Amino acid sequence: MSTIETRERRGALRGIGSSQTSTPQNLMVFVLSMALFGLANIILEIIPDVTVGPVDVSVSYFVFVPLTLAALLNPFWAALGAPLGEIVFTDLLMGDFSGLAEIEGFIQMFLAIYVAGSLVRDPRSRPQIFLGAVVLVGVDKLLSAAVDIGKVWVGVEDAELVEGLPQSIVLLEGIGFGVDVVMSGILFGAIPAMWLIPALHGRIEPLLGMRPRVPGEPRPGSVPRTGWFVVVAVLAALVSFVFAFLEAWDLSVGTVDADFRDRFGDGFLWVAVGALVAVLAIASILFAVWRRRGDR
Amino acid sequence: MRDDPVVEAVDLSFRYPGADADTLRDVDLTIRRGDFVAVVGGNGSGKTTLCKTFNGLVPHYWSGEFAGAVHVAGTDTWESSVARLSSSVGYVYQDFQNQLVRPTVRDEVAFGPVNFGLADHAERTQEALEKAGIAHLADRFVWQLSGGQAHLTALASVLALRPEVVVVDEPVAELDPAAAVEVYERLSELHREHGVTVVTIEHHAEFIARYASSVLLMSDGAPVWHLPTAEALARAGELAEHGIPAPQVVEALARLGVEGVPRSPAEAAALVRTAESRGALRRSGPRTEPRTRTTPAPPARAVAAARGVSHGYRSVGGDLQPVIDDLHLELLEGDRVALVGGNGAGKTTLMRLLAGIQVPRSGTVVLDGVDTRTERPHRLAERAAYLTQRPERMFLKASVREDVELFPRSRGVPDVDALVDRILDRVRLTAFADRDGRTLSGGQQRRATLAIGLAMRPALLLLDEPTASLDVGSRDDVIAMLAELSGSIACTVVATHDMHLVAEWATRVVVLDGGHVLADTTPRALFADPDVLARAHLVPPQVAQLGTELGLDPLPLTVAELAAHFTTVPLGVPA
Amino acid sequence: MSVARVQRDVLSVEWVKLELIRTAYATRGGLFAGMDPRAVVGWYAAMALAPWFTHNLTTVACLFVVAAAAVVLARVGPLVLGLFVIGLVLELVYLALAATLFGGDLTAVVALLEVTAKLGVLSLASLAAFVSLDPEKLSDALLALRFPPAVAFAVSYGYRMMPILVEEFATVMEGYRLRQLPPQQRGLLGWRVVVHWAVVAVKAFYPIFLNTAKSVRTTVEALEARGFTFATIDPRGRAIRIGSLRLGPLDLAVLAVTAALVAGCYAAGAQWPLHRS
């Protein structure tokens, strides 16, 4: 940044501002991402879903909203805010809260937005934006399809013995995945994003007191040590599966010890509470790790 | 007194990240403890940025190029942090509604002390609630509050940290006049009784004259001067240059050749009487006939009419809250109607009903000969245009031009480009046609919404608070533009708190109170009617107040009309 | 269209906004509104986990009834309940279609029905617990359970912002409705109209992004100035917040009754077992 003034400033220059975003600016991206993605979800919640045959062809989310914030401002904080907005605004309030599956959804969405946002290196490049939107939906839906298939396997006793069930699940998930990529990824993802991101580039940043991104410069909010981040991401993905299967836990607990269950019916409440506490503890540790990473 | 500074800036310069010029440039400034400072200056003079250096938002939050130093209560802000400085400086924003982050008033006020983990948080909260005079609202939800109450809640929430300095950014901008006076009275009490240093950013000379003890004039990112209020107001010409015209009474006395800088109409009246008794001033009949409503000879066409209209909304509790109650009103061609009344009197609801955006629960609204119940809203939009109070809510597109052409183009109006060019030229925005409306200044934003309305080519144009949060220069600009429109729009209705707008522009005033029409009259008759003024909480322009004090008839609505009541007697000539 | 326009009190944007406020701030009262939030979270955990320990359809059905009763006691509003019921019905339709598509064997449906019913208990429990829980209390409970402050804040701020955002969206949509003419030909099944509104709904985000960015800036500055970040480092603020939480007799009674009912469900399951063949 050059100082083009006719006369020199009198005061001694004490700081020139860093290209990294500051903590409050991160907080701002986080809050913005949460609020806007939450709003998008409310809108979708109120619009009735359309199902054609067994396949849901409705739009699952407006991915262009978090993608825009991730591409223009800061992928890490946008990725952290958006799934939380979904949980807080729609799932909790609209009674869609699905307990542990929320954590699984959070991790999937976080990874998807972060990866997709990082792919968009030049906010004015439409091919990159297209790729970002499709990858976002791809990552999220692939993870959740895998989890769903696994859940039925674990959740239904002897699932493989039920005639036609495994095939129908895999087929339905496959079709659903394709529909989601087209509907959410392209029609309501890539196409709006290819218009919105260049339109907002240079306009939204000054409102937040930030400098518009210049293509190719080190992005704010990208992870300094990529290797370490990949390790955490893989761990997070694994954890997301663990959470998913915790929900369908009944296989092990349900078959073990029928007598025990009969004798101590409500004793299981405490088992349940204990399990929840354990899960919350893990979640807190994860959150704490993320926050410390985000502060850097 | 200069030896006890609470805020001291030395060689301060600041540039926002990505900007190509400094917003603040070589600022040297001292604010002494216990002062009540009004910061004035045109749009873009750096007032708000300067005030954000006091609580450390600049440079800790906005990390741009920062040079020089600011000391607050002896602490160098560069060495400190926003959190630590918040116990020295409290900041109330212009858009204070966004400052409220908690659901209830008490939670909101306690937020600061609880975050800092202060053991006496409960006492601080109670104390701040009482200082702001809102202890009785403590358990309300913030979305139940009126604008004035919300502003006082924002004030209480910063007072809870017991700051030495309170900065209030343009309290008048978003509040109705009665609420603005209430806020200033509270600030004045804090200043007098609790020794709090108050800094306000203010465009309105009346408030400066009445409450401030010193005035800081900013221009191009640096202070021009910082003077006691009386001296500052005496420099009327210089203030006017920076968009702060002198209070009307000051201007009026200058016009009459009477010495002195009055701080209120009562003071001005006393000065005029003294001049009269000395024989320097003599009353005469008004030389020019004051402007009266010219009633056209043929009965004018009714552009819109409300007959027995009632309307209301469901509250959170589920019950129906009436807003408009059995209202009758007929708007005629050629009318320039000002719709006045306190907040919650039903002005906005009535305008939305007249525009056909909503339909009344009972009664009928006839717009340009069409019952609004029988036509879809987008068809009624071809007859009436409603411009919202917040201009940014009307900017749907990425440029002013696209916003203006949205309506005519989708309706297949022939030769849209020429129409849009003509309208943009008329509101003097041709140079800004490709900018996003949100990046324009307040006055330009208003003109842009006006252009959107004009492109709809309506018979009835409805504007909600078109002069709110404008500095005086931009406001006069908007009023002049409204006056020019009379040729192309059959009837214009303006909902407003701005009595200058009423006095200078309107030919007819409709006073709403509790969903009824309290009075339907001319501005001159309204300002001469103390009962209606008191019931609707209206404060006439200073020149009309001065006219009332002096018993002038007909009541003057402008300084020129007041001057016409008097003859100045040259010195040395016997009366 | 010759249908006369009237002011509608339900199924309008204003109604949705009011419903959200009523829901969020538990102004309807209800059983859980008066309880300690930690007890409510505990109750939820118990109800949410209970169905997963069995494959006995009788038990699952009983639990479903208990959860539904809790929803009634919690006085859940019509909007939220309506959305839930629509979701459940669609799920059942989906299952029936899936069954017909893959050979008409009902065992697969019953298997999936079991999972659906379990998820239904979960949804009903979360409806009752979280929907009637004041977001401030929920936020305090999350703090007490050692969630990071940003999450606790997000919960309370999200609820406060939502009606404002919904209104902002409604204003922008109204602007488009008045200023942009919808297509004159509706097309097959009104597809032109659907496309028109889909495009408008997306375009509405341009002004909403910018307007929200502007207001969020003030909010975050104000948060910063009142020690929000400070509170994430300093534990004293948290201590004050959660210091006001108290377990009362009502909490214990509700938890005890719930425990008894859950035990009862299992007992009923043991008495009249019904398993998928």
Image (cartoon, rainbow, N blue to C red):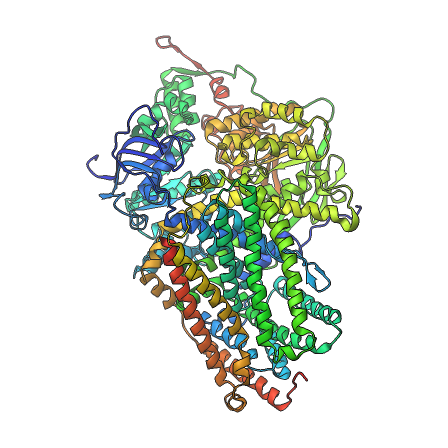
**B288 versus B519 height, above or below:** above
Judged from this view, the residue extending furthest toward the left is: B3
Residue B331 visible in the current orientation: no
Displayed quadrant of residue A162: bottom right
Displayed quadrant of residue A45: bottom right
> Is residue C245 left or right of A42 when viewed as pictured?
left
**B526 versus B92 height, above or below:** above
Residue C183 in the image: x percent, y percent? 74, 42
Residue C143 in the image: x percent, y percent? 40, 65
* Between C149 and A225, the one nearer to me in the picture: A225
Q: For the point 66% across and 53% down, which residue is it?
A: C12
> Is the C terminus of chain B in the top left, top right, bottom left or bottom right quadrant?
top left
**A110 versus B94 height, above or below:** below
**B451 versus A272 height, above or below:** above
Residue B497 visible in the current orientation: yes
Displayed quadrant of residue B230: top left
Judged from this view, the residue extending furthest toward the front is: A227
> Is residue C52 left or right of B296 when viewed as pictured?
left
* Between A174 and B151, the one nearer to me in the picture: A174
Residue B144 in the image: x percent, y percent? 51, 53
Q: For the point 60% across and 45% down, which residue is it?
A: A192
Q: For the point 21% across and 35% down, which residue is it?
A: B1
Residue A13 in the image: x percent, y percent? 27, 35
